[in-house]
Amino acid sequence: MTREEILNKKPLHVLEKIRENLERLNEKMEVMIELQKHGHKDIQPLPDTPLDVMTLLSMPDHLRKTAMTICRCGRATADEVAQQTSRARAVESAYLNQLVIMGYLKKERKGRKAYFYADRDSQG
């Protein structure tokens, strides 16, 4: 391959990477738009609701996956949960905050990071 072919190929490679990144961003934006559409209007805060087996089974799949990840990790940020679930950090952040509003998880800020955990004292 000549030097000119290599130089011509590199911009195409860069453009392909940009296209892939834009596609991923569009997918994430669609998820965020869906989350905003559905909002949290129907969720009523419940104080210290236990996160037991029956509660987990009654949850929608997307929330159950997030809640079970927190149960396994003990305490984690949205980014750490997203790494475990292979979902976008923004999506996990929304799910974690929904679980906090519902009373299943607690949220604690340390500096700029927010840590989520199940309050073991109220779990019984």
Image: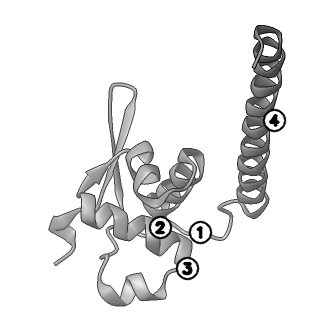
Q: Are marks 2 and 4 in contact (CB under 8 Å)?
A: no
Distance, label 4 to label 3, CA atoms, is 33 Å
**Placement of the C terminus among the 4 image quadrants:** bottom left
Contact check, label 3 and label 2, Cβ < 8 Å: no
Q: Mark 3 to mark 2: distance in Å?
A: 13 Å
Left or right, residue 50 beside residue 11: left
Question: Residue under circle 1?
Answer: 43
Name the amino acid type tagged 1.
Ile
Packing grade of label 3 (10 A; few <14, some 14-19, many >=20) is few
Tell me the amino acid under the disc marked 4. Arg
Estimate how packed mark 1 is, as few (under 14), some (14 to 19) or many (20 or more) residues with alpha carbons within 10 Å: few
Compare marks 3 and 2 and give the one earlier in the sequence.
3
**Mark 3 element type:** loop
| Image coords of residue 75 (percent x, y) | 26, 52
Q: Nearer the viewer, residue 99 or 73?
A: 73
Q: Residue at position x 40%, y 82% from top?
A: 56
Q: Secondary structure at mark 4?
A: helix
Residue where numbered disc 3 is placed: 60
Residue at which label 4 appears: 19
The percent coordinates of residue 95 (x first, y second) are: 53, 59
Q: Are marks 4 and 1 in contact (CB under 8 Å)?
A: no
The alpha-carbon separation of the residues under discs 3 and 1 comes to: 13 Å
> Which three-letter amino acid code belongs to the residue tagged 3?
Pro
